[in-house]
Image (cartoon, grey):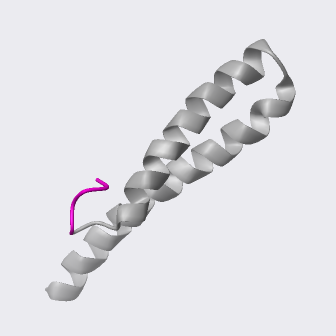
Amino acid sequence: MARTTTLPRLSGILVAVGALAYLVGGGIAQLVSPAFWAVVFLGSASLGVGLAWPGYRLWHTMTVSD
């Protein structure tokens, strides 16, 4: 996703960082401290934006070209 020229490069970076932050933050929040739930929330938001951005861009390109 970060290497293709048809999708925004930043969306691939958001997916990679968001997924890692979500998984690591969730594990740490359950085992160490509930204060890390903020990291889980930010990771899931980053993952969601990283997946929605190229989806919207592909959908918008299809509807405009018709």
Q: Is residue 51 visible?
A: no
x%, y% of residue 33?
A: 84, 21
Q: In this image, 46 relative to 7: left or right?
A: right
Task: Give the residue furthest to the top.
Answer: 31
Q: In this image, 10 relative to 54: left or right?
A: right
Q: In this image, 13 relative to 66: left or right?
A: right
Which of 5/59 is in front? 5
x%, y% of residue 32?
A: 81, 16
- The structure residue drawn at horizontal position 50% and vertical position 38%, both measured from the top left corner, is 19
Check the image and report above or below for 25 versus 56. above
- The structure residue drawn at horizontal position 51% and vertical position 48%, both measured from the top left corner, is 47
- The structure residue drawn at horizontal position 41% and vertical position 59%, both measured from the top left corner, is 11
Q: Is residue 45 visible?
A: yes
x%, y% of residue 49?
A: 51, 58
x%, y% of residue 30?
A: 75, 17
Check the image and report above or below for 66 versus 47. below
**Residues drawn in magenta:** 1-5
Magenta part, dominant SS: loop
Which of 65/27 is in front? 27
For residue 55, which quarter of the picture? Answer: bottom left
Q: In this image, 54 relative to 6: left or right?
A: right
* Quarter of the figure with the C terminus: bottom left
